[in-house]
Amino acid sequence: MLFSDEYGINEAVNFRQRAIFIAVPKTGTTSVRRQLREKQKYLVEVPHLDLREVRTALDFFFTVRGLGANRSFPTDLSKVPEHEESLGRAAEFYRTSFKFGSVRNPFARVVSLFKRREGLTLSDELDFSQFCDRLAFASDTSVWSTRHRTQSDWLKDRDGEIGVDFVLKLEEREAGLKTISEMTDGRIVLDNRKLNVNEATQPSSYRDAYDDKSRRKIATLFEEDLDRFRYKF
């Protein structure tokens, strides 16, 4: 076995609890990620993989784990997992795992992107209206930037549809964590801890950052998230 049990794919995948967590950046994921993170070496250290990337990583992980299994001579081919068998194991783990992701009101999230304390900090260079004018993707200020235009893009499977079993809203965290426990029959129990909180981006204050122009821009850019997750300004 080329990968021993000390190796994992990414903190998004917890094999013991059969859980896959898609941590959309700037949606309050730190506490959930720390609770789900297994004490392993990770092949992919990037903290914010999307669902399709996790699915691809599972295929690779199970395929490599299936290599180097021959221990007999003459070779007993029945003991050597074939590529298709490894992909089947990956697909079965994916199918039977509880998959969930996190989202946040897009208007509040954009303020958080603007005032972030890590990655690209632009609040000293631009005013908020200028920031909104230039914003094109949902993680433009992230060190691990992607071309995802919306939060929904992180949660889509290979068929282009939302592939998670549950969407955890930052604004309804307590109720959402309880629902996850109920949906998994107590297999996944998470505390509602608040870590890495930026006081400048609290829910009660984000509206003050907007004028009519910036509000229209963000409403257009993240229309899919607003409609899908039923958020309003």
Image (cartoon, rainbow, N blue to C red):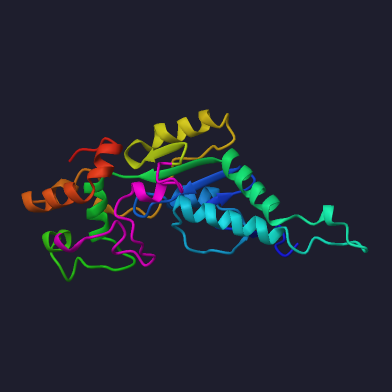
Q: Position of residue 152 (x, y in %)?
A: 34, 46
For residue 194, say whether it is visible: no
Q: Nearer the viewer, residue 15 or 171?
A: 15
Q: Quadrant of the C terminus?
A: top left
Q: Return the x and y of residue 83 as percentages of the image width and height.
A: 68, 56
x, y percent for residue 34:
51, 52
Image height of 109 relative to 97, above or below: below
Q: Is residue 131 left or right of residue 184?
A: left
Q: Is 85 colored magenta in this rendering?
A: no
Number of dots carrying numbers: 0
Quarter of the view holding residue 42: bottom right
The residue depicted at 34 percent of the width and 53 percent of the height is 26
In the picture as drawn, the residue positioned furthest to the right comes out as 74
Look at the image and tell me whether residue 166 can be seen.
Answer: yes
33 or 14, which lies in front? Answer: 14
Determine the residue positioned at 40% across, 46% down: 160
On screen, residue 51 versus residue 122, left or right, reads right
x, y (%) of residue 161?
40, 42
* Relative height, residue 34 to residue 169 (above, below): below
Q: Quadrant of residue 39?
A: bottom right
Residue at 46% over, 40% down: 164
Q: Locate the N terminus by quadrant.
A: bottom right
Side of 96 where 201 appears, left or right: left
* Residues shaded magenta: 133-162
Within the image, what quadrant is residue 147 found in? bottom left
Residue at coordinates 35% horizontally, 42% vertically from top-left? 170
With respect to residue 109, does 74 lie above or below? Answer: below
- Above or below — where is 183 with respect to 64? above
Residue nearer the viewer, 77 or 49? 77
